[in-house]
Structure formats: C-alpha cells, structure tokens
Amino acid sequence: MLRNWMLSLLWPPTKKSKEGGFVLLITLLVVLLLVVIIFEIDFQSRADLRAAGNFRDDTVSYYTALSGIAMGKALLAEDLKTSKDKDSLDEVWALRIPPLPVGNGMISFAIIDEAGKFNLNSIVNSGVGNQIATGIIDSRIKQLRHLFELLEVDPKLVNPIIDWIDKNKETMPDGAEDETYQALPSPYETSNAPIKTLEEILFIKGMTAEVYQKISPYLTVYSETKINVNTADSLILQSLDSEMTESDVQKLIEGRPYKDTAAFHTKLPGVVIQGRLADHPNLFSVNSIIFSIKADGLVHNTQKTIHTIWNRDKKKYLYFKVE
C-alpha cells in the first residue's frame, strides 16, 4: 500500500490516461454490441432459412402427393378404355404399388372402389316424401345392422343414422332428432338430408372416434347405392344376409371377377339366401363410377397426404382434403 502511495505521488495519473481508459471502455462496449447484433442476425437468418426450407419442403411434398392423385386418375381413365363392362380387384388400378422415388422425395398412392363399400344414404329413400321406403330400403337397414354386428359395434347406432338422414322429425327407438342435439353444450340441428361427407357421422348420437375408426373403412356416402360384388370387402359380402358364413363368403370371393350380377347370384349359397337376395337385384353391380384416391408425398421429413373422391365418369372431385 505504501509503495503504491509513493508511486502515485511521483507519477500522478494524467488526464490523457483517464481519457484513454474511457475510450477503451467505449470501444469494448461497441465491440460487444456488434457481437450481439451479429449473433442476432445470424440466429434470425438461420431461422428464416429453416422456415424457407420448411415452406419449400411443404410445397414440394404437396405437389408430390398431387402428382400421385394425377397418376391414380390416369390409371382409372385408362381402365375405363380397356374394361368398360366390369371393375374388379385384379385390374391395374387396384394393385398395390410400392412407394416411388420422385426427385428428393417419395410418392405413394392407393385407389379404393367406393362401390365396394356400404352407402349410408341408401338406408333412406329421400325421394319418398317423409317416409322410409319399404322393400329394398328395409334390406339395406338390415344389412347395416348386421355389418355393425360383424364389426362388434352396437347395431342400435343405425336408428340415429336413419333419424339424421330422413326428412321427418319423429324419433325412432334409440334414435335422435333435434331435441337431443339442441340439448348439447354446443347445440346443432339434425341434418334431415343425405350425408355429404363421411366425417359428418361423427355428429350423430352415439358415434365416437373409436367407433368411427372401426366402421369408416366399410362405409361411403359418395357411390351409387349398388354394391360392386367384384370389389366388396369380405365383411360387406357377409353382411348381405344374416345366414351368410365366412365359408360362403370365401366361395363368393373365389368366384370373382363376375362378368354380371346374374353370375354372382348363381354363386350365392343356399336356396333361402339366393331367394332373399334375388328379390332385390338392384343391390348389386359389377362396375363402378366413384373411387377414393389417397396419395402421400414425402420430401425430407415433411409429408403431405391428399385424400380425394373422384367421379371417373364426370371427371370431377366429390371430396378433396389435404392433411
């Protein structure tokens, strides 16, 4: 301490040295500020670059998936030229095509015949006033109930579906009309019209996400009401009659493709089942008009899925969804 005091007496700090220290401090602060600004610019640039990359991959994956939809439409158009009389699962459009490399990504797509499913709108004849038609409509209702049983879903769900579609306001047993839906925390009205998209059934009483996952692969609201016996799933065929067994269905599948519905009728098991289903020839067909085309586009770690319903005859989309 004494030494420092003596040195300060001999060489007291000058004004110039004080100013130099101040300048040095300011310089250090400026350098620090520049470093912070540079790091901020670098961080923001990297973030913008990542965002631009994500946007690029998102856009490319969308158009990659869209090209899959275009390929599906082209296959269906070509099939229409070469096979007008029937549509079956042994045709090119129905084959499983492995994912294909496209540029920096991958593309995959699948085509499903909507006529191979059960059309929910077929359980109500919207052209007969406020009444549910008898005959073929009754058979549709029985078939849907049996299909739900095969899928281990409560068949009581059929009546709320009928109430949702039919024009009247009368509630069926275990069904639901406006009073049921108006009492919900977020109230809404019964449609009282044909179902427009399959997801709409999630609004119907008793329908849960779990039930929807079980039944949606077998249902449609887009196709004509006839079931294509050449493309129908085994459970759809088994649901045609309560006495139909898995063995009966296997024999029907082994007989495919059928050139016409008469050939299919001859393969139906038993006189009783043949008689019951022969009474409703308008239940069946061997060709189709409307198809589901689902395509996935994958670029780097970004994937886009496009799900469409395509009317091949009218060349128009009935449904288009990007996920």
Image: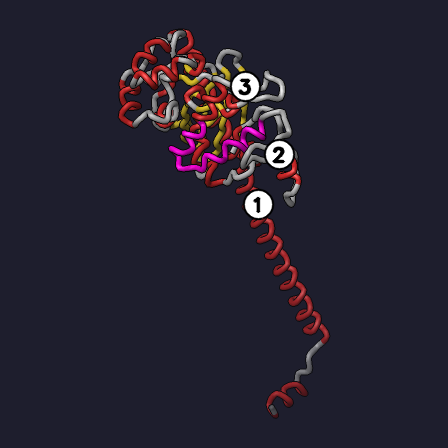
Residue at 65% across, 38% down: 179
- Secondary structure of the residue carrying numbered label 1: helix
Q: Position of residue 170 (x, y in %)?
A: 62, 30
- Secondary structure of the residue carrying numbered label 2: loop
Callout 2 amino acid: Glu
Res. 260 image quadrant: top left
Residue indicated by mark 3: 133
Check if mark 2's residue and mark 1's residue have beta carbons within 8 Å: no
Residue at 30% across, 20% down: 253
Give the crowd class for mark 1: few <14, some 14-19, many >=20 residues within 10 Å: few
Q: Main secondary structure of the magenta part?
A: helix
- Secondary structure of the residue carrying numbered label 3: loop
Residue 67 circle label: none
Residue indicated by mark 1: 45
Question: Disc 2 versus disc 3: distance between alpha carbons?
Answer: 19 Å
Q: Earlier in the sequence, mark 2 or mark 1?
A: 1
Callout 3 amino acid: Ala
Q: Is residue 4 above or below residue 271?
A: below
Q: Position of residue 50 (x, y in %)?
A: 53, 42
Boundaries of the magenta span:
144-165
Question: Disc 2 versus disc 1: distance between alpha carbons?
Answer: 57 Å
Task: Classify the position of the N terminus by image quarter.
Answer: bottom right
Query: Which one is in front, 96 or 128?
Result: 128
Give the crowd class for mark 2: few <14, some 14-19, many >=20 residues within 10 Å: many
Residue indicated by mark 2: 177
Query: Which one is in front, 175 or 13?
Result: 175
Q: Earlier in the sequence, mark 2 or mark 3?
A: 3
Callout 1 amino acid: Ser
Query: Which one is in front, 226 or 275?
Result: 275
